[in-house]
């Protein structure tokens, strides 16, 4: 997939060196509650991304800057269970040198448009640390609204959700309770 400035392509194990460099960078883990990712953890995650693509035909992309071909991040949507219901987890992580250029929003808009078109029955969710203002601003710009708090085992996280047209009657369904989210792979 291509946007105005980005190439969004299926993640492969060949992306490991770049994704380890990006995802193990302490700056990119500022809001990660489970701690800084090391090379081993990133490798397991990338293998999970590859498996998700194999099983579902979609998943997190490796994000390249179209003008240079440089890998600048990772992101997209994957399936996960949230409070026992299927959802599409919208995720992104970019090199610090790519911050402040609107790349995360550009990638996230492409992912949300794809999800709303191809998987309209599954809500898009952004699950993030409650103090991660950049991710919260991005979620709101995509039209997601704060829904429930979730706990993935490292403390409460904010959840923003877009139910789409087929889910509009569920807005506010969860109230203020905390839900359990199954880890995404």
Image: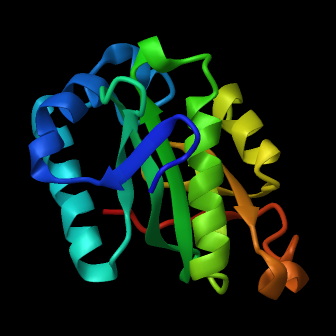
In the drawing, does residue 76 fall left or right of residue 179? left
Residue 22, horizontal then vertical, whole percent: 30, 25
In the drawing, does residue 68 fall left or right of residue 125? left
Q: Which residue does the image show at 65% across and 86% down from the upper left?
A: 121
How many numbered marks are there? 0
Residue 4, horizontal then vertical, whole percent: 58, 40
Q: Which residue does the image show at 48% across and 50% down from the upper left?
A: 2
Q: Nearer the viewer, residue 17 or 144?
A: 17
Q: Can residue 97 be seen at all in this image of the molecule?
A: yes
In the drawing, does residue 123 fall left or right of residue 74? right
Residue 126, horizontal then vertical, whole percent: 62, 53
Q: Which residue does the image show at 72% across and 46% down from the upper left?
A: 139
How are the colours assigned in the image?
A: rainbow
Q: Is residue 109 above or below residue 112?
A: above
Q: Is residue 150 above or below residue 119?
A: above
The C terminus sits in image quarter: bottom left
Q: Is residue 113 above or below residue 54?
A: above
Q: Can residue 150 be seen at all in this image of the molecule?
A: no
Q: Nearer the viewer, residue 57 or 153?
A: 57
Q: Quadrant of residue 1?
A: bottom left
Q: Which residue does the image show at 58% across and 67% down from the upper left?
A: 114
Q: Is residue 144 above or below residue 140?
A: below
Q: Nearer the viewer, residue 65 or 78?
A: 65
Q: Nearer the viewer, residue 183 or 48?
A: 48
């Amino acid at each position: 997939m291509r946007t105005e400035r980005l190439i969004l392509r299926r993640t492969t194990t060949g992306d490991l060196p770049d994704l380890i460099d990006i995802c193990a960078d302490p700056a990119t883990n500022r809001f990660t509650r489970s701690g800084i990712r090391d090379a081993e953890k990133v490798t397991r995650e990338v293998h999970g991304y590859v498996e998700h693509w194999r099983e579902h035909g979609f998943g997190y992309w490796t994000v390249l800057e179209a003008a240079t071909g440089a890998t600048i991040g990772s992101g997209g949507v994957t399936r996960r269970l949230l409070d026992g219901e299927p959802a599409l987890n919208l995720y992104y992580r970019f090199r610090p040198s790519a911050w402040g250029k609107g790349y995360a929003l550009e990638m996230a808009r492409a992912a949300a448009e794809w999800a709303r078109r191809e998987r309209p029955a599954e809500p898009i969710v952004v699950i993030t640390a409650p103090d991660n203002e950049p991710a919260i601003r991005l979620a709101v710009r995509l039209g997601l609204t704060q829904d429930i708090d979730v706990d993935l085992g490292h403390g409460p996280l904010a959840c923003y959700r877009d139910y789409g047209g087929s889910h509009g009657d569920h807005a506010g369904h969860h109230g203020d309770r905390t839900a359990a989210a199954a880890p995404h792979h």
